Amino acid sequence: MNDVELAPDQTAQLAETFGLLADPTRLSIVVLCLEREIAAGDIAEELGLSASLVSHHLRLLRAARMLRAERRGKQVFYSMADACVRDVLKIMINHLFVHDHDGSDEPDEGED
Ligand SMILES: [Zn+2]
């Protein structure tokens, strides 16, 4: 994937996708689903949010194909739709909180 070229509508779609993740509540929901399946009710409980607010966010995240839903009995379980969004989030979490930034990977000014 060198030479990435996006049409304007694709760029808009990408911005929309990052926009979905720019909401702290939605991001918390996605992070809860990062490594496991979790029922909608448990998401609401863990985050201390109303069921209706959680289901509103879950609807958006499903529509964007970030999460998938599976009904089992009376409960609907949510998990990552695929590895892509999970990988992006893990990389960013690692970038922010795990690996050391000693500046060595920063591009030198005036070189290159
Ligand atoms: Zn980094």
Image (cartoon, helix red, strand yellow):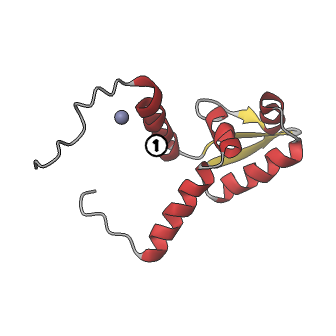
The residue that label 1 is drawn on is: 88
Specify whether 55 is left or right of 23: right
Query: Residue 94's spot in the image, x, y percent?
Result: 43, 30
| Residue furthest front as drawn | 110
Q: Is residue 79 above or below residue 103?
A: below
Q: Secondary structure at mark 1?
A: helix
Specify whether 4 is left or right of 77: left
| Residue furthest left as drawn | 111
Specify whether 60 is left or right of 74: left
Q: Is residue 6 above or below residue 58?
A: below
Query: Residue 60's spot in the image, x, y percent?
Result: 70, 56
Query: Residue 93's spot in the image, x, y percent?
Result: 48, 33
Quadrant of the displayed image that contains ligand 1: top left
Residue at 43 percent of width and 36 percent of height: 91
Residue at 68 percent of width and 53 percent of height: 62
Q: Is residue 72 above or below residue 62?
A: above
| Residue furthest bottom as drawn | 8
Question: Of the residues shown, which amino acid type is indicated by label 1?
Answer: Val
Q: In which quadrant of the rendered image does the N terminus lie?
A: bottom left
Query: Residue 59's spot in the image, x, y percent?
Result: 75, 54
Residue 74 position by quadrant: top right
